[in-house]
Amino acid sequence: MDHILVTGSLGQLGSELVPALQVKYGRIGVIATDNHPPAGDDYPGQFHLLDVLNKAAIQETIEKYQITQIYHLAAILSANAEKNPALAWRINMDGLLNVLEIAREAGISKVFWPSSIAVFGPDSPKTHTPQNTLMNPNTIYGITKVAGEKLCAYYNEKFDMDIRSLRYPGLVGYKSLPGGGTTDYAVEIYHQAARSGSFTCPLAENTALPMMYMPDAVRATLELMAADKKSLCVKTSYNLAGISFAPKEIYAAIVRHCPDFMIAYSPDFRQQIAASWPDSIDDSAAQKDWNGKWRTISKG
Ligand SMILES: NC(=O)c1ccc[n+]([C@@H]2O[C@H](COP(=O)([O-])OP(=O)(O)OC[C@H]3O[C@@H](n4cnc5c(N)ncnc54)[C@H](O)[C@@H]3O)[C@@H](O)[C@H]2O)c1
């Protein structure tokens, strides 16, 4: 029987991935962890405090719960990373190295680690950005994701491990709040429309970015993890595409339902990050290798 460890499980992705994993493996089979406790006393499942910088604690948790798969989500996201690059490097890189080393030592059968479209940079093609292209990111977050991809590929090849990864676009869902990324505005705008009736957007109105509806991202993750290892040719991380839109397009969609909703554009440091990222992504390698059908909702 599989026992799944999820790090950083209280974040935007973990809040929706953990329930999906519980459906597949049962509540008893999923150990959700984070470096702070959940809000409230009644976490719906098994929760364990775990800092990914504490290698011994990861090791103990893996032994205690007889973990067979790890979903390593703990990270500092793009906008927060720019505020504290050294911390972002420690958590994103040392945390990943700890998990990979322990997985190797413990013979963990599978590891999932999310990468991001932030691996691309100003000299990558802007539209339909291919799987393999120039990747020279100019953000610390992007640098940790490129280095993380290379580290995963190294462990896959050197130690014959099974580490799988997706380059998520900006994730948009209504069940959880985003954690300090450049695409957070696409979630926050809905909350502000409902709460205050106005929103100040940190990106310029025409800044198109690749995005994905959270249930599609969760489904893609589970499908990748279920795919036959022999069919997976990409040992770093798969491009993943949903839709692309700019702030003015979400605003136009919301205003159809909330005619009094106001928006102001006040681009800040996040505009520069967004400007270095692709407008749209080519994920044909993922479609070819594991035939994902994750775009049903995002395309709908
Ligand atoms: N949300 C997106 O749009 C998006 C897009 C691309 C990639 N990703 C990747 O997906 C993963 C999850 O992202 P998310 O949106 O859920 O992020 P998030 O910021 O919402 O959640 C990250 C979680 O990690 C935890 N964490 C931070 N430091 C930790 C530590 N030292 N030990 C243990 N836990 C720690 C935080 O408490 C938080 O709950 C990350 O690797 C991120 O880079 C997310």
Image: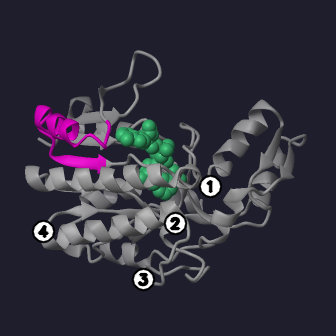
Q: Residues within 10 Å of mark 3 (few under 14, many from 20)?
A: few
Label 4, residues with CA under 10 Å away: few <14, some 14-19, many ≥20: few
CB at disc 1 and ligand 1 closer than 8 Å: yes
Q: Earlier in the sequence, mark 1 or mark 4?
A: 4
Q: CA distance from mark 1 to mark 4?
A: 35 Å
In space, the residues marked 3 and 2 are separated at their CA atoms by: 14 Å
For the point 31% across and 43% down, the residue is 53
The residues bearing labels 4 and 2 have C-alpha atoms spaced at a distance of 27 Å
Q: Amino acid at mark 1?
A: Thr
Whether tag 3 and tag 1 are in contact, CB under 8 A, the answer is no
Question: Which label was assigned to residue 160?
Answer: 4
Q: CA distance from mark 3 to mark 1?
A: 23 Å
- In the displayed image of the protein, which residue is found farthest to the right? 260
**Label 4 near label 1: C-beta < 8 Å?**
no
Residue 43's spot in the image, x, y percent? 38, 22
Q: Amino acid at mark 4?
A: Asp
Q: Nearer the N terminus, badge 1 or badge 2?
A: 2
Name the element at disc 1. loop
Residue corresponding to mark 1: 183
Residue sitting at 19 percent across and 63 percent down? 162
Please state if 284 lies on the left or on the right of 247 as rendered: left
Camera-near label (3 vs 2) is: 2
Is the Cβ of the residue at disc 4 closer than 8 Å to that at disc 2? no
